[in-house]
Image (tube, rainbow, N blue to C red):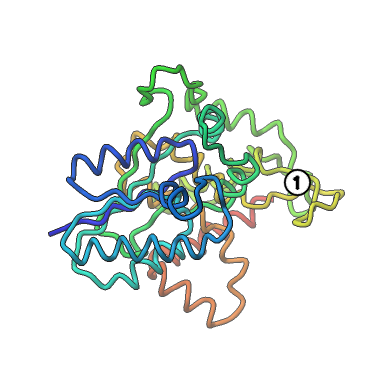
Amino acid sequence: MNKLVMMAGLPGSGKSTVAKKLAAAENAVLHSSDDLREEMFGDANKQEMSDLLFKELNKRIIGDLMKGNSVVYDATNLSYKKRKEFLDKLNLDCFKECVLVAAPYETCLTRNGRRNRKVPEDVIEKMYRSLFIPQYYEGWDRINIVYRDARDNNDGKGIENDKGNDLHKFIEELKAIPQDNRHHTLTIGEHCKRCMENIKEQNADDSLVTAALLHDIGKKFTKAFKDLKGNPTEEAHYYGHQHVSAYMSLFYLRHLPVEKILEITNYIQWHMRPFDLHSSKSRLKALNLFGKNFYDNLLKLHEADTKAK
């Protein structure tokens, strides 16, 4: 059976390097969004007309799969909706694998700065605040995580370390950061620990307990005294913190099996979703996407989160 391997990762994560190695190992056709931009527009940095570009890219990928070729799809692919939409429309009998290439955000910025084809830092930050860790409900047969940080880096350029992944030390650091928001009286670190304690009282499984501790660690990065339009505000906002928290958690969970990492990060990246479940339609949609067990646990996390003021 031929195979589709879809890459996912921030610019500068090392995604394209991994994609080339996978294409060689799988004897697969490599389709790259950057290469197609160069072909179509004469400039791999040209970000306009992305809809046109991905329409052509997807057409070529599907064409090769229909011929029986295996394909490696090299693009950032950070939206779960777009990944799922692509798989839903694929309608082909092939093995579908998603490979998330993970490197710390600061490392991605450093690598990006060394490249000839640089992505603006504000664009990378926007991706960081909105990315979704791949999950099986999107339609994958297998999901893999490839770490490309200091310990796994082999480019010989001495990329910065990943801060040791000392979770206890990091939580202690977060205890000194006030949330400066009317919805919270505890600091970020205190809130994370209180949420975890609340979950433990519900006799929840270890994945949910871990997710509770990690669910807001991205708030340090996202804290800003401005609204979505950039206007100054008196209280702090944390737009996209759930996505940053989930991504940061990857580096504290790397000792676990991939399936466990995916489960924990999925709780984290969706922990704000219950705030939007106001109608029976929205609740049914979430239930259909996640399944009952995950949905029920997500509500437990939400309860523990809201109680940890």
Question: Along the line of sight, which residue is nearer the eye, 87 or 139?
Answer: 87
Judging by the rendered image, the residue that carries numbered circle 1 is 185
Q: Secondary structure at mark 1?
A: loop
Q: Residue furthest front?
A: 42
Give x and y (percent) for residue 217: 58, 40
Q: How many marks?
A: 1
- Left or right of 238? Residue 71 is left
Give x and y (percent) for residue 72: 29, 50
> Image height check: is 296 above or below 211?
below
> Image height check: is 132 above or below 277?
above
Give x and y (percent) for residue 230: 80, 52
Question: Along the line of sight, which residue is nearer the eye, 163 or 110?
Answer: 110
| Mark 1: amino acid | Thr
Q: Name the residue at 21% across, 49% down.
A: 28
Q: Toward which corner of the image does residue 229 lie, by quadrant?
A: bottom right
Q: Is residue 203 visible?
A: no
Question: Along the line of sight, which residue is nearer the eye, 78 or 302?
Answer: 78
Q: Is residue 111 visible?
A: yes
Q: Quadrant of the N terminus?
A: bottom left
